[in-house]
Image: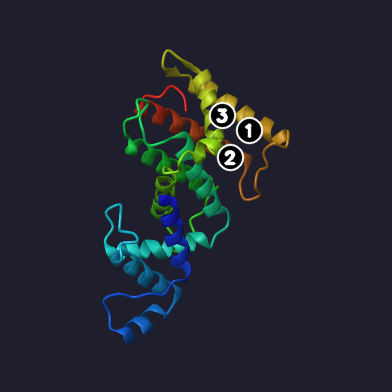
Amino acid sequence: MQVRKVILVLVFSVVAVAGVSRPANAQSANCTASQQAAIQCFVANAVTTKLTEPRYGMTLAQFEAYGVAVNNILQTHHTYLMLLGTSSAIADAMPPTNANGSANQSAQDLAVTQIVSAAVSNQLANAVQGVTLQDLQWFSLDITNAMNDNNGVMALLTPGVSLRIIDSYVVTATTNGTVNWTTVDANLSSAVDSFISSGMMKVPGSITTVQLKSFVITLAHVISDYKVSTGRKTL
């Protein structure tokens, strides 16, 4: 699956040392100078051997810098776990297709970037040194796109169940195609309180309940926009 290639590149970028288009001695000196140099050399070599290729309009230099950013993301704990979990949920519940089965990659891509932005603004994911919001969004897009090719595994594991639960609140508060967002926001806020008080949800010490509620409510709006774009009634 495509996800194997992406994970391979991400993991190898942390440890691999390779160089291209330089004399052998220069390769050794430059590519072992630092972790950053090693990753940049690996990315350049991966592009040359067609293991991967620059995307999102990046130049090779920008792609090398992105490789360094990915390494920094992987050195975090909750940030990359949050992004991986979010990507798997989106790949499951918000595929890059319309309700009629035709392709709509832009709808999924927009959902990914909006959800990552919400996660960062509410401290569920943190930008780390040398990593921008754009890097976090690109990382999530890469993982989500890879997970789209899953041979039905997502349907078995259903990592998108949390998004579908949130969507159920949107569906319930929709009349003749119009969403009553006052009702949605209030009901989701109450639901978060109930999940926390019952022990079904534990809020990490790094965020507040207010931030968690803000993130969940933002998810509801992103889900609604996605459904409009893809012509879906529910997730």
Residue 192 circle label? 1
Q: Quadrant of residue 106?
A: top left
Q: Which residue is mark 3?
A: 165
Percent of width and height locating residue 166:
54, 29
Q: Amino acid at mark 3?
A: Ile
Task: First in sequence, mark 3 or 2: give its number.
Answer: 3
* CB under 8 Å between discs 3 and 2: no
Q: Secondary structure at mark 1?
A: helix
Quick check: 82 above or below 49? above
Q: Quadrant of residue 187?
A: top right
Q: Nearer the viewer, residue 189 or 108?
A: 108
* CB under 8 Å between discs 2 and 1: yes
Q: Which residue is mark 2?
A: 212
Asked whether residue 216 is in view, the answer is no
Q: CA distance from mark 2 to mark 1?
A: 8 Å
Q: Secondary structure at mark 3?
A: helix
